[in-house]
Amino acid sequence: MFEKLHRKLTLLCSAITTGILLVMSAAFLLVSENSQRQNSFLSFCADMGSLLAGMEEQDALSHNWLKKLEGSKYRIYLWDNGRPFLFSSLSSSKEEQALCGSILSHYEKERQGQNFPQTLQPLHNEFVWSAAQNAECPLHAASHYAGVMTWLRNAAPVTAVVLADQTPLRRHLLLQRLRFLLLDLIGGLLFFSFSWFFSGKLLEPVQKNHERQTWFIASASHELRTPLSVILASVSACEAAPPAEQARFFAAIRREGKRMQGLLSDMLFLASDQNGQKSLPKASADLETLLLNVYENFEPLAQKSRHRFTVSLPEKSLAPCICSTEKIAQLLSIFLENAFSYTPPGGSVSLSLRKDAKNAYLSVADTGPGIPDAQKELVFLRFYRMEKAHSQKNHFGLGLCIAADIAKAHGGRIDVSDNRPCGTIFTLILPLQS
């Protein structure tokens, strides 16, 4: 499921970014090409003025001079009083001559047959021409730029048609488009790679959360199945048992029902998270009194299990702490239950309280086997239990997870450290009232 979602997100992100890149490239190309065409035509118009001035100054238009004037950019066709120059017929093909004839006819129509008196000033007009349409056209459709100039030479009008083939410019613009297309393809591949990596990173916590949820449901189902099986078996046995033996089965049903009730209560507490913060009733509390009450509640258990149980309080009173005394007592009870469960008889369990300028530290230390460093973070996962706890029915693996949620709801945190030479110290760090 996540692989398919990963692919879809990657394709969506890369398609959007590549589409934006293509649109921006197309817009840039459009502006750039229009600018290049306009600059090219303006340059052609400026050259026509210079060519006309140069031709007027020449007494004789020789073939060599005209060839040099054409260079690699232009083709020049001349008519002297309506008769074509020999240079024009020698240096051009029939197609080019026909094209020049069409341009000259268009030019003469615009002049409307105007004659040239002796005082007429030289004229020149520039056109954007399409050979395919044999007419003027927009810049983007031009096959040639055409300049037609007329001046008087020896009292007779001389007309010159200058053609500038736009094939080099079109080829340049095509290569520019191909370069941009190649860059867009490279950009698309880069966007795809980035989208694959980025969407994978985005989905990683979602996938982990889904895996944890699946594992949580499977673990909860397993934990609930055991007491349910015992209850159903006890009901069946109770139906077949004589009245004198039914009390034993009723006791088993009651015991397993309480286990299920406790498990469901823990699961409901863990599920009551609202935007990452549980809503708990809080009030100003005296932590020393809270600690002593918890100590008194666990003294009978310590005596029964033959553990040395001590409490340590600071010499100076602590500032009040805004907290839920019920939940902090529950958290300390979770620490103490684990400590008594894991510490062998004859071992020590201690409950202590200390402070610094900003925080209060409520610690439970034991002399049990300790927790390996690799498992210090895992113990706060739901239904995670160390090997010894698997054999104990009262441990569901939710206690420390609940403790962590209680600490988070109070703006505090839990620290796990080693108790030298053996054992573990669980410390709740709570902010004091400023």
Image (tube, rainbow, N blue to C red):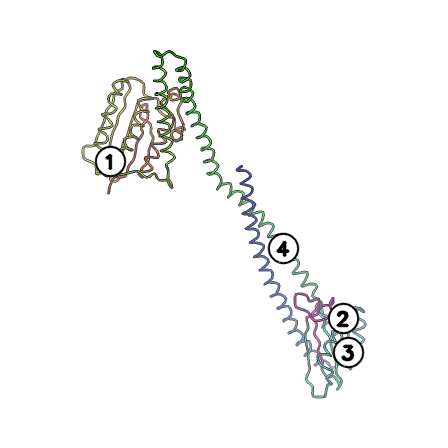
The residue that mark 3 highlights is 79
Which quarter of the figure is the N terminus placed in? top right
Mark 4–mark 2 Cα distance, whole angstroms, equals: 33 Å
Task: Identify residue for label 2.
Answer: 99
Q: Which mark is residue 355?
A: 1
Sequence-first tag of 1 and 2: 2
Which label is found at residue 336?
none
Camera-side mark, 4 or 2: 2
Report the Cα–Cα distance between label 1 and label 2: 99 Å
Q: Is residue 141 magenta?
A: yes
Q: Which mark is residue 179?
A: 4
Inter-mark Cα distance, 4 to 3: 43 Å
Mark 3 or mark 1: which comes first in sequence?
3
Query: Tag 1: residue type?
Result: Lys
Q: Position of residue 271 (x, y in %)?
A: 38, 35
Taking the spot 45% from the left edge, 36% from the top edge, the residue there is 209
